Amino acid sequence: MSIKDRLFVASQHLAPQHAISRLAGRLAEARLPSFKNRLIRWFIRQFGVNMQEAARESVEMYENFNDFFTRELKPGIRNTLARPGELISPVDGAVSEAGKIEYGRLMQAKGHSYSLIDLLGGDLEIAQPFLGGDFNTIYLSPRDYHRIHMPIDGELKTMLYVPGRLFSVNQATAGTVSNLFARNERVVCLFDTPAGPLAMVLVGAMIVASVATVWAGLVAPQTSGVRKIHYDAGKVVLRAGAEMGRFHLGSTVILVFGEQRIQWASGVKAGTPLQLGQIIGSYSPSGATTQYQT
């Protein structure tokens, strides 16, 4: 790791992470045209955002920076149609790590792993269906599309908000900060699917001002402890490819499936770039849906 990266990581331990992130959130909501247009243009140049894919190509068409950051894509720019037995990428991003959950732990980066139970809010009963299963951690860079979609048909059973820190989740931090994804603020969404139980974990990060879902609106930030909400059968049912949430400034999505339920595609490994709708794995569509116990 370079000296620059070491200093960047060290500074995060000292920085008032939540205060910085909330300030960034307020700036991202500013509507003054001269300010928000200049900020958006700088961001596009700095990170190489492809505005030709955006439904609104002109920066003047966005109300504020958050409106731009959560921009929608042009219709048909991504194929999100999944056939039975296919898992599709829920986002544009890159695989950070993917593989088996071994001894109740997920790989974070070389030399670092973290607890499944901690990731899912410290609840053994919630974690139980996923022990011995498979996970895929997908990092969204600043230039990526930041709406999150379903990788498979799913019925929402439970949502948890888990408070925590707001470390950056880039490669330098993931390779240095232990238990990163189990320490950061996150929203855990638990679904029943044709491949059994699925946990979609939306991980917050430095200057991520908020996380939202299509059924609950703004979920993070919160000021209290772990918050658990159960949903009645049939209340929230989403098809594969449907939008399920979004980041206001970007972060990471972690997919967690149960044991022997799915198989990742051969090319899905650390460093693999992904596009929304890309096939990332498979499952047996004939298997009965496992009812998730909460």
Image: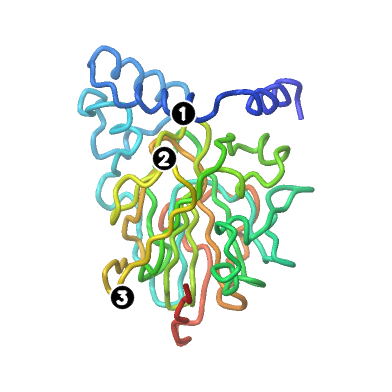
Could you say where residue 171 lies in the image, as x and y percent from the top left? Answer: 65, 38
Are the residues tagged 2 and 3 within 8 Å (C-beta)?
Answer: no
Write down the residue under mark 1.
21
Q: For this rendering, which residue is in front, 146 or 181? A: 181
- Which numbered marker is on residue 233? 3
Amino acid at dot 2: Pro
Write down the residue under mark 2.
221
Amino acid at dot 1: Ser
27 up-or-down from 49: above or below: above
Are the residues tagged 3 and 1 within 8 Å (C-beta)?
Answer: no
- Which numbered marker is on residue 138? none
Mark 1 or mark 2, earlier in chain: 1
Please give left or right for residue 165 compared with residue 92 in the image: right
Q: Using the numbered discs, state the Cα–Cα distance from disc 3 to disc 1 in whole angstroms.
A: 35 Å
101 up-or-down from 274: above or below: below
The structure residue drawn at horizontal position 35% and vertical position 34%, both measured from the top left corner, is 69
| Tally of numbered discs | 3
Could you say where residue 281 lies in the image, as x and y percent from the top left? Answer: 53, 67
Q: Secondary structure at mark 1?
A: helix
Q: Using the numbered discs, state the Cα–Cα distance from disc 2 to disc 3 in whole angstroms.
A: 27 Å
Please give left or right for residue 153 compared with residue 47 in the image: left
Mark 3 neighbour density, 10 Å: few (under 14) some (14–19) many (20 or more): few
Are the residues tagged 1 and 2 within 8 Å (C-beta)?
Answer: yes
Amino acid at dot 3: Ala
